[in-house]
Image (tube, rainbow, N blue to C red):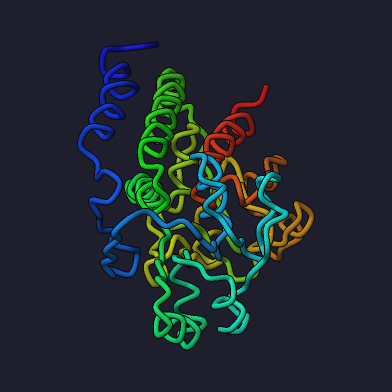
Amino acid sequence: MITADSLLLRYLIPLMLLLFSPQPGSGFQVTDSIGTSHSFAAPAQRIISLYPAHTENLAAIGASDRLIGISTSDSYPSAVLDKPRYSYHDSVEKFIQAEPDCILIRPMISRSNPNLISKLREYGIRIVSLQPTTIAELYDYWLNLGKISGFEQQAAQMIVDFKHQIEDIEEDVATVPAELRPRVYFESIHSRMRTFAPESISIFCLTTAGGINVAGDAVSRRGTNIAGYSKERILAKAEEIDVYLAQSGRMNRISVEQIINEPGFRAIKAIRSGRIYLIDEYLVSRPTPRLLQGIKTIRQLLYQG
């Protein structure tokens, strides 16, 4: 349903950003995910992205031409996959030869290879570390990518469109009484018995889709979206778990059979009833507009039939 508030979000906010955002040549600042403030005289023209989410989001706002390199892990969208590939394990010389004016990383890269980052900065290359862990941070992250690339209005419109679709889903979910909503355990890494932090983007996807997170008492590990949840804690809630949902991909190489055959797991209500589902991690863990696809997929799994 289109409301006055929805129309305000859709049209007025992007217009205000257009009127009041920094104009070419006026300069701007971006504070990244590790608290470093970066001053830009103008948007970056030659960007290397070392995180697939950065690549996907820049493409989504129309800034693909700003990309001169992408990560070795990139697989989407297809339109950018022919660009040169880079890894944080590459030599300093390889990056310098590309002459980037900005390299986009995420905090994990800073922790894994601090020497590379410091050496690149010594050569005057700007390194910006971005990765949101909550839905509020997601919108700031998209706007920052827009500022850095010179596509701020497009990023703002992407946020408006995303929020509008979230509102539509929430209106639909609101028709389901709370007592009829399935209680879900959402697995992030099976081998380590990990779930997602309650404030994470992944749990936002679950709850927006109409699921109730049974691991709401989980605690984030080192400020990430991952949270520990021991087998003992899972089994203590065995009869509460209507659905066992697991992300599947590079972070969690898992199958339904492995989950079923995990010692002790047959005590879980969802295992006994056959309500074990896998979902592509890129749709629930990667901070891109495809989160909408993830939310819709979860909703179909929870309420199928």
- Give residue 264's quadrant in the image: bottom right
Is residue 153 shown left or right of residue 303?
left
Is residue 52 shown left or right of residue 165?
right
Q: Residue 84: x and y, percent?
A: 68, 63
Q: Residue 256: x and y, percent?
A: 75, 51
Residue 168 vs 138, above or below: the answer is: above
Q: Residue shown at 46%/47% (left/top)?
A: 203
Quadrant in the picture for the N terminus: top left
Q: Residue shown at 40%/85% (left/top)?
A: 122
- Give residue 131's quadrant in the image: bottom left
Q: Residue 213: x and y, percent?
A: 45, 45
Q: Residue shown at 44%/32% (left/top)?
A: 162
Res 129 visible: yes
Q: Residue 247: x and y, percent?
A: 62, 52
Residue 50 vs 305, above or below: the answer is: below
Camera-side residue of 37 and 167: 37
Residue 101 vs 82, above or below: the answer is: below
Q: Residue shown at 44%/21% (left/top)?
A: 168
Camera-side residue of 289 and 218: 289
Quadrant in the picture for the C terminus: top right
